[in-house]
Amino acid sequence: MPLIGVLWLLLLCSLAQAQTLDSVLKKMDAVSANFHTAEANFVWQQYQRVVDETDTQAGTVYYRKTGSDIEMMAEVKQPDHKNVLYRDGKLQVYQPNINQVMEYSTGANRSEIESYLVLGFGGSGQDLMKSFDVTYQGEENVDNQPTAKLQLIPKSEKVRNSFPKIFLWIDLSRGISVQQRFEQPQGDARTAKYSDVRIPAKIGNDVFQLKTNKKTQFVSPRG
């Protein structure tokens, strides 16, 4: 094929990918505009390259968005029971087996933290483009479900130092992420897979409350 033909073919491919990315982002925008509640089962995996081991946690996650306020509760059921609650700019991790709650304030990083909570899961495509350089990686099946794979490079150097690359697999029919992968330095990686996603979901107010008692110890780490 003549060089001009190769260049023309590459241009057409580039335009097609741009159009596909645009359609995925618009789908995410539409979902975000009407997003209020969601519930899903999850499997979280943390891979550590040094020891070549993967730690797995499974459970159910709940989201609720009221105006600009975001709440998230993750009920980890395996291997050990614990609850991870985010609301009012505070992250709390409750471990019933030791009756202790670790509390972390997001402070000035609140908006950044919240954008990661709804990354591909109620977050808009426009917000995605503000924080990341996004490229379309093609279509892939996740658990026999057609998805669009997106690569995200954080624009923030601080975030890039923790997660140089992030991948999202967006369900083409619903505009939400069914799989996420956060690549870390030295080859470590965090992967999240979501199934039985329900949007909207009927979620009571009690879901976003920790079931603590009078003897529960609350600890706020320094630093």
Image (tube, rainbow, N blue to C red):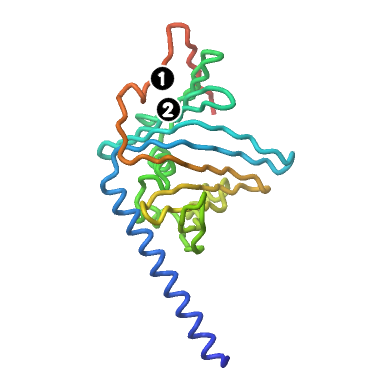
Which image quarter: residue 199? top left
Disc 1: CA contacts within 10 A as few (<14), some (14-19) or many (>=20):
some
Q: Which residue is mark 2?
A: 85
The amino acid sitting under disc 1 is Leu
- Circles 2 and 1, Cβ within 8 Å, touching? The answer is yes
Most extreme residue toward the top, as rendered? 214
Mark identifier at residue 180: none
The amino acid sitting under disc 2 is Leu
| Image-based side of 51 in relation to 129, left or right | right
Dot 2 falls on a residue whose secondary structure is: strand
| Image-based side of 48 in relation to 145, left or right | right
* Relative image position of residue 180 (x, y in whole percent): 51, 47
Residue drawn at x 47%, y 76% as measured from the top left:
13
Mark identifier at residue 210: 1
Viewer-nearest residue: 70 or 37: 37
Viewer-nearest residue: 186 or 167: 167
Q: How many marks?
A: 2
Of the numbered discs 2 and 1, the one sitting upstream in the chain is: 2
